Image: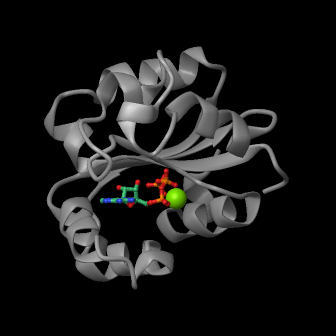
Amino acid sequence: MTGNRTFTMIKPDAVENGHIGAILEKITAAGFKIVAMKYTQLSVRDAQGFYAVHSERPFFGELVEFMTRGPIVAAILEKDNAVEDFRALIGATNPAEAAEGTIRKLFATSIGENAVHGSDSDENAAIEGAFHFAGREVF
Ligand code: ATP
Ligand code: MG
C-alpha cells in the first residue's frame, strides 16, 4: 500500500443496529472505492492481536468482548490520502466529541461502542488489510 489505502471495520454495534448500508453509503459518497470487503467475526485471539497496543489499558477486556460479540464488515478502501481522509470522515473516538456529519457522530453510541474502525497509519493499514484479506480478495 502506498498511501492511498486504508482498512476499516464496521463494528458489532453498528451491525446490530442495522447501519451497514448507511455507513457504506457515507464511505462511497465520500469518494472511497471498496477494493476488498467481507462479513466476518473476530475471534478473541484476533481481537487481542488487533488491539494489542491497548493491552495494558483498563478498557482492554471490554474492548475485546465488544469486538467479538457479533459479526463485523471488514474492508480495504482506496482514495488519495486514504488514512487521514477516512479518520476525518469517521470523526473522534468519542462520538460526543465527533464533528457533525461524521460517521461516529451519526451512528456511534459511546467511546467504547463507536461504530467503525479506521487505520491510524499507512503501515497499520497494510498490516490490518493483510490480516483479513488474501491477495486474490483485493481488487
Ligand atoms: P479504532 O482504532 O477502533 O479506529 P481509534 O483509533 O479512534 O479507534 P483507539 O485509541 O485506537 O481509538 O482505541 C481503540 C478502540 O478502543 C476505540 O475505538 C474504542 O472502541 C476503544 N476505546 C478507546 N478508548 C476507550 C475508553 N476510554 N473506554 C472504552 N473504550 C475505549
Ligand atoms: Mg486506533
Front residue of 90/96: it is 96
Question: At which x and y percent is residue 50?
Answer: 45, 73
Quadrant hosting ligand 1: bottom left
- Left or right of residue 85, residue 28 in this image: left
Question: At which x and y percent is residue 61?
Answer: 23, 76
Name the colour scheme: one colour
Front residue of 6/57: it is 57
| Residue at image point 44% right, 34% down | 97
Tell which residue pokes out farthest to the right in this image. Answer: 2
| Residue at image point 29% right, 67% down | 42
| Residue at image point 52% right, 25% down | 27
Residue 99 in the image: above or below residue 53: above
Front residue of 58/79: it is 58
Q: Residue 110, located in which quarter of the rendered image?
A: top left
Q: Pick the quarter of the image with the C terminus.
A: top right
Residue 121 in the image: above or below residue 10: below
Question: At which x and y percent is residue 81?
Answer: 80, 38
Residue 95 in the image: above or below residue 124: above
Question: At which x and y percent is residue 117?
Answer: 45, 49
- Left or right of residue 28, residue 63 in this image: left
- Left or right of residue 117, residue 72 in this image: left
Residue 105 in the image: above or below residue 69: above
